Image (cartoon, rainbow, N blue to C red):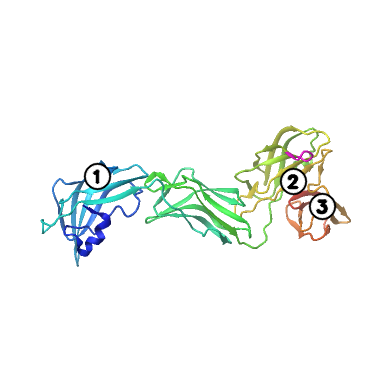
Amino acid sequence: MLSIMSIASTLNGFASGLVPIQCTIGDKPVCNPIVDIGFTFDGAISILENSTATIYSDGQPLETGALSCSNYTGEKRTQGTAVVKFESPLLLPKGRTYRLVVPEGVIMRKDKSDISNEELSVVFSVPATIGPATPSIKDGSIVESADRIGFYFGVETAPVENGKVKLLREGVPVREYDCDVSWDWNLGYAGIDFGEEINFENGVRYSVQLPKGCVSALHRPDIVNEKAEVSFTGGYTEPVNPIMYTWCSLYDHHPTDVLGEVRFFYNQPVALSANPLVQLYNNNENLVVKEVVPIISNENGQWVLIADFENTPLVSEEGYSIIIPEGTLVTKDGDVVVNQRNVMSVGKTSGIAGTGDEKITVRVDNGIVVIKQAAKRSCIKLFSIDGKIVKSIKTYEKCVSIPVPTEGIYLLSINGKIYKISVK
């Protein structure tokens, strides 16, 4: 018996029979239906009439194919090809190993019939998955910008219906994309096509997750990928303006004994992240009273985050806060920007109060916003009502003064917590 692994040694003169120089199966996992299997010989060959070859599984015969041959004569040499042809394409069960056996003496030299093959045995496998995923970027690298990120496979690939790839920011899923799949000769690819080159915020941790079953072998939809993930750190150093709401329905409507629907207005396209939540928090008892999944609507050119607390009772004389956790919202397109953690207090009088540490005080004197008792290195941003940044600073003293040249309504963010102020 001559196994395919011993062909190389026989080429150096250690076998007296007819030895193939190549076989079309056995060198890599088989991820496609098997129509035929070929052996190439140096020189013209013939086949014993009515010869067959058999595929075995666990020692038992599984499929049999008919043997035929052809010869091609070129300028320098002649090559013979023996082909095992099956009656219909074979979809062998995945995750198993098989053995093709060509009997001894059925393939002969065309001009020397006394020279024939020993038994040929080729072991091959049909894999359970499409194999290792190699990321298109180095895991742990710094990425400033990219138009696509994904994974390469050693087999040709095809999309699976409804396959989605996730983009995570600081461990939180913020966007979901249709799985972008392509293939070239003996290679496959699956990942995210951003549609344009986008920037990744400096120092922020990102990852791309390809869930299990998003992509399959090109001709075997039952052979799919395992879960794959690549992580990287953003390297884009230009300033990034966070998502800020420009108005809230609580500015006009102050709840008294129950909290129903609350609406936050944004003047830029936003979308919900993969796991969005808005919370009602009891400040006195330090607990979350209710969590709701918000929705997004578009009204008169503004994007509106709607959180319906379903008339949750508000206990008299207790303070509450509405919390939009960081990463609840993400920019709909382009660069990946998320909201900071926003906290709006519903005070004991059920009016809207300052939304930071209760020690912080904010007042306006003669066009100057005065902030006291802010922690050192607090991030303070002043926004106009249309969402434009008027001033952005980090505190080094407990008292901060910000001159405001124009009268009007402003939003003051202290470490992501919002105050609505009026400058006269």
Q: CA distance from mark 1 to mark 3?
A: 81 Å
The magenta span reads: 282-287
In this rendering, would 229 be left or right of 390?
left
Residue type marked 2: Val
Q: Can residue 86 be found in the magenta stretch? A: no
| Residue 254 is at least partly visible in this image | yes
Residue picked out by circle 3: 408
Q: Position of residue 117 (x, y in %)?
A: 17, 54
Q: CA distance from mark 1 to mark 2?
A: 69 Å
Disc 1 and disc 2 in contact, CB within 8 angstroms: no
- Front residue of 131/79: it is 131
Q: Residues within 10 Å of mark 2 (few under 14, many from 20)?
A: many
Q: Position of residue 286 (x, y in %)?
A: 76, 40
Residue type marked 1: Phe
Residue type marked 3: Gly
Question: Which is nearer the N-term, disc 1 or disc 3?
Answer: 1
Q: Position of residue 262 (x, y in %)?
A: 72, 39
The outermost residue toward the right is 366
In this rendering, would 168 be left or right of 287?
left
Residue picked out by circle 2: 343
Residue picked out by circle 1: 86
- Front residue of 375/90: it is 375
Q: Quadrant of residue 56?
A: top left
Foreground disc of the pair 1, 3: 1
| Residue 199 is at least partly visible in this image | no
Q: CA distance from mark 3 to mark 2?
A: 22 Å
Query: Circle 2 — which element?
Result: strand
